[in-house]
Image (cartoon, rainbow, N blue to C red):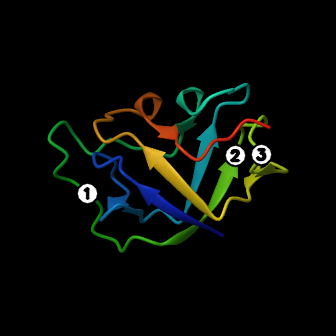
Amino acid sequence: MTNLTCNAHCCTYNKDNLCSRGDILVTGTGANHPSQTECDSFIGAGRDCYCNSSSSGKESISIACEAINCVHNQDRNCSANHVGINGSKAHSSSETECSSFQMR
């Protein structure tokens, strides 16, 4: 399990910058830069972002990863100690990114 912080405040799963989902998928198969990745598990909480999760956020979650060029990708799972998901103004998954992505 990886420690994760998330600043995608308009995600249904965001609870105090943690993810209440328990697992996420980072996509970006051919990514060479963090901006070419995204949190595919993002679900928008509405235009005004009032619907943040009522569940507890988890500090450690399972992260599946399709960014095969990332040094942290181990058999399509993230091996980083900490992952940050960026997208403070995101209203869709395409506006998020894995800030922990590092090119092999």
Q: What is the secondary structure assignment of the residue under circle 2?
A: strand
In the rendering, at what x and y percent does residue 2 appear? 62, 66
| Residue 43 falls left or right of residue 100 | left
Which of the two discs, 1 and 2, sits closer to the camera? 2
Q: Earlier in the sequence, mark 3 or mark 2?
A: 2
Gap in angstroms between the C-alphas marked 3 and 1: 31 Å
> Which labelled disc corresponds to residue 71?
3
Q: What kind of residue is marked 2?
A: Cys
- Which label lies toward us, 3 or 1? 3
For disc 2, the marked residue is 65
**Measured Cα–Cα span from mark 3 to mark 2:** 11 Å
- Name the residue type under label 3: Val
Can you give x and y, in whole percent of width and height, for residue 48 in the image?
14, 41
Q: Earlier in the sequence, mark 3 or mark 1?
A: 1
- The image position of residue 24, as x and y in percent, is 57, 53
Q: Residue at x 36, y 74 (%)?
A: 56
Q: How many marks?
A: 3
Image quadrant occupied by the N terminus = bottom right
Q: Secondary structure at mark 3?
A: loop
Of the 4 image quadrants, the one containing the C terminus is top right
**Numbered mark located on residue 52 in the image:** 1
Image position of 15 (left or right of 96): left
